[in-house]
Image (cartoon, rainbow, N blue to C red):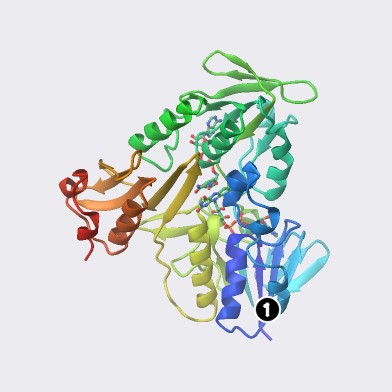
Amino acid sequence: MAHIVITGAGQAGAALAARLRALEFPGDITLIGAEPVPPYQRPPLSKKYLLGELPLERLFLRPEEFYAENAIALRLGQRVDGIDPTAKTVTLGEEVLSYDQLALTTGAPARRLPAALGGDLPGVHVVRSLADVDTMAPEFRKGARVLIVGGGYIGLEAAAVAASKGLHVTLIEAADRILQRVAAPETSAWFAALHRGHGVDLRESTALVRLTGDDRVRHADLTDGTTLEVDFVIAGIGIAPATDLAETAGLACDGGIVVDEFGQTSLPGIWAAGDCAAQPCRGTRLRLESVQNAIDQAEAVAANMLGADKPYRPQPWFWSDQYDVKLQIAGLNRGYDHVIMRPGARDGSLSHWYFQGETLLAVDAMNDPRAYMIGKRLIENEISPKPESLADPDSDLRALLP
Ligand SMILES: Cc1cc2nc3c(=O)[nH]c(=O)nc-3n(C[C@H](O)[C@H](O)[C@H](O)COP(=O)(O)OP(=O)(O)OC[C@H]3O[C@@H](n4cnc5c(N)ncnc54)[C@H](O)[C@@H]3O)c2cc1C
Ligand SMILES: NC(=O)c1ccc[n+]([C@@H]2O[C@H](COP(=O)([O-])OP(=O)(O)OC[C@H]3O[C@@H](n4cnc5c(N)ncnc54)[C@H](O)[C@@H]3O)[C@@H](O)[C@H]2O)c1
């Protein structure tokens, strides 16, 4: 009986295993995860779960019985530490497991602040796993002083939870604006104002010099010359794809495990999907760090493992919840040269539409689900409206659809 081994039991690994069974793969499936808990969704970790508004059991992607019922051998708390592509085996400590096909869905751990800057002091947290958040959550006491390093999604979502819970929040961003990796200056400025309006001391173009303390972190020296007294620190400074296993096995890696449009790595029979995979996209190679990509790419890989031979074409979308604002993003703004702002129908709602010349690339919608839905459909259908028709708040967005 053919045996498919999936290394990494996160969003992509779980989707891949489930899709193999949905496609009626009759062979054996082993899903191996280093974390001690069944596959779960990460987005609520920095939102409702951290706020205490979502119980643990709602995090799990499927009930634990699902795996046994679908003959998926789920091996938790176990780490694959080697791959032999010639013998077609993986090792877990002393154990050697044979595979016919192998998928790598190893994700991307959070980058940590260097120990030389005090990043290893107790009270300095990252936000990637359930264990990270369960360790950090007791620090969220009203009146506590938190320094958040990094103004990406993690930093901003954690800042929103902390400010909502009555903590004193300072957020530093080394670049000249928050969200610079994912959004236009207009969107960054809008979110900076939102956080300042909730009392966050948000400092752009400011980095960490060092963290100090005895038994735990107590002070933070910043490049703006100030020293803060802190009760704890959260580093939201990005992720580093888990490529060690792949590199040691001789798979091509380039800022992620290199895959083609089918999800196949540089070695036949070995596939990769999710945050760890660097895929071709619009003439370049990139990793898409999102739930939607992890699921869609994993499902495409499942089909291709069974011979579908179907390329995966990502249609990116993202979301973020901060205070009472839902940010929804459709498309990828890379290469944009101008942005059109469109006020939404409701107070405080608006959208930013990114163009490269006359081509619509992406939409950021703040509390404006209609702009998001219509923008997403336009981008998927490669329809680019005239910028002037968007800027007029009275124009009917639906009329832009075919
Ligand atoms: C706090 C937080 C909030 C987020 N919010 C959003 C959001 O709102 N919207 C959105 O689209 N995305 C969000 N993301 C990103 C999203 O969760 C990721 O893109 C997604 O989880 C990627 O799935 P993955 O399966 O590739 O990786 P992961 O979910 O990270 O899973 C990888 C798993 O592989 C395991 N593993 C690694 N190496 C091995 C090994 N050698 N042996 C065994 N197991 C191994 C890891 O322990 C991990 O459990 C968020 C992420 C975080 C951390
Ligand atoms: N809503 C969402 O989609 C969502 C929510 C949370 C997390 N995530 C995902 O989780 C992952 C990690 O998120 P993230 O926010 O950590 O990464 P990120 O790369 O989006 O943002 C990191 C930010 O930290 C800044 N930075 C880096 N080093 C710094 C330093 N030393 N001092 C100050 N600033 C520094 C960077 O300039 C950047 O703005 C990403 O894949 C992200 O997409 C997504």
357 sits to left or right of 18 = left
The residue positioned farthest toward the top in the image shown = 225
**Where residue 125 sits: x, y (%)?**
67, 36
For the point 47% across and 54% down, the residue is 288
The residue positioned farthest toward the right in the image shown = 94
The residue positioned farthest toward the front in the image shown = 346
Out of 182 and 252, give the one closest to the viewer: 182
355 sits to left or right of 103 = left
Examine the rendered structure and indicate whether residue 141 appears above or below residue 11. Answer: above
Ligand 1 positioned in quadrant: bottom right
269 sits to left or right of 365 = right
For the point 50% across and 67% down, the residue is 263
Badge 1 residue CB within 8 Å of ligand 1: no
Examine the rendered structure and indicate whether residue 40 appears above or below residue 45. Answer: below
**Where residue 100 sits: x, y (%)?**
65, 78
Q: Could you say which quadrant of the image residue 77 lies in?
A: bottom right
**Where residue 352 sits: x, y (%)?**
31, 43
Whether residue 333 is visible to the viewer of this picture, yes or no, is: no
Examine the rendered structure and indicate whether residue 48 appears above or below residue 63. Answer: above
159 sits to left or right of 177 = right
Q: 10 Å neighbourhood of mark 1: few (<14), some, or many (≥20)?
A: few
Quadrant where the N terminus is found in the figure = bottom right
Whether residue 198 is visible to the viewer of this picture, yes or no, is: yes
Out of 158 and 268, give the one closest to the viewer: 158
Element assignment for label 1: loop
Quadrant where the C terminus is found in the figure = bottom left
For the point 57% across and 31% down, the residue is 163
Query: Which residue position is annotated with label 1?
Result: 70
**Where residue 235 sits: x, y (%)?**
61, 35
Q: Could you say which quadrant of the image residue 120 lies in?
A: top right
